[in-house]
Image: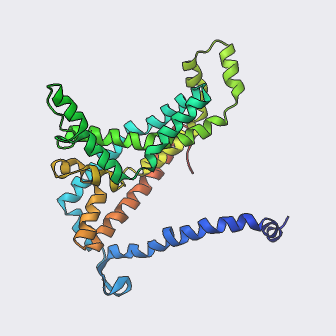
Amino acid sequence: MKGSAYIKRYWQLYALLLLPIVYFLIFRYGPMYGVQIAFKDFNLFQGIAGSEWIGFDAFRQVFAMPDFYVTLRNTFMLNFLDLIVSFPAPILLAIMLFEMRSVWFKKISQTILYIPHFISWVIIGGIVYQLFGNQSGMINNLLMNMGLDPIPFLTEKNPWLLTYLFTGVWQSAGWGTILYLAALTGVNKELFEAAEVDGAGRLKRIWHITLPSIKPTIVTLLILNLGKMISIGFDRPYIIGNVAVREYSDVLSTFVYRVGLESGQYTLATVVGLFQAVVGLVFILGSNYISKKLTGDGIM
């Protein structure tokens, strides 16, 4: 069948594809026009086209700022710890849900685990302060009523870091199980039955059948997560962070907010954003190359 005849026959499918294409053109490729702000002395009233070209002067200015390196270090640190703590959590949850025999309990558990993903970080921040606040927090009130000293969950660096990581796992782990559960539903059930007949216990079936079956999904998501090592969401560190733990909570996204929106230095904010994009691309390509060399799986 020729290409034109094929398109004419299945035009409904191409019509459905049109909407995401338009979305990406408008909201993904369209904003790339603004990247040139990083190379201009951007003036809000003159616009992008009317602003003067300054070359790499803004890059030199950003790379000379001590705060930039502090936020860069914090971004790497928080993302790396998140990768260690948060990445395995949905894998473990997915395996536990998959191994459940009670259908009704499995459905209830999935619903409870998915709910935190749909809660705004502003609301989660309020919950965190209600639970872990130094004076008014429920946990510290309980500790003081028991005659114990309160724990500075939100005002000292190391306790804050643990609180930050725990909150991230609670918010994202349940939703992250969806992809792994979808991959597990495609596993041939006869493999588990044959392994059980051969005397393999549950742990051996998980190790030799379940994990190898979701290995491509794990590798793909790991590569994508490594590509995000230098980019970090604004909501969690900004809402949970405070002045007392700024040495850890100040990251590139909050730096861009301070420099770009509060100070009006849009050129410097664009430089940081472009820097994150380029380094993130290098991380994705590098991790994909290493993964293909070591495991034979990759995303490209």
Quarter of the image holding residue 298? top right
Determine the residue positioned at 37% across, 65% down. 274
On screen, 248 above or below 2?
A: above
Determine the residue positioned at 66% across, 18% down. 195
Q: Is residue 252 left or right of residue 144?
A: right
Whether residue 57 appears in this view of the structure is: yes
On screen, 143 above or below 272?
A: above
Q: How is the image coloured?
A: rainbow
**Whole-percent x, y for residue 242 in the image:** 20, 51
The residue sitting at the right extreme is 1
Q: Nearer the viewer, residue 87 or 3?
A: 87
Q: Nearer the viewer, residue 255 or 230?
A: 255
The residue sitting at the front extreme is 145
Determine the residue positioned at 24% across, 64% down. 258
On screen, 274 above or below 170?
A: below
Determine the residue positioned at 65% across, 36% down. 185
**Whole-percent x, y for residue 146 in the image:** 18, 25
On screen, 158 above or below 244?
A: above
Q: Nearer the viewer, residue 87 or 70?
A: 87
Number of numbered discs overlaid on the protein picture? 0
- Which quadrant holds the N terminus? bottom right
**Whole-percent x, y for residue 99 in the image:** 58, 26
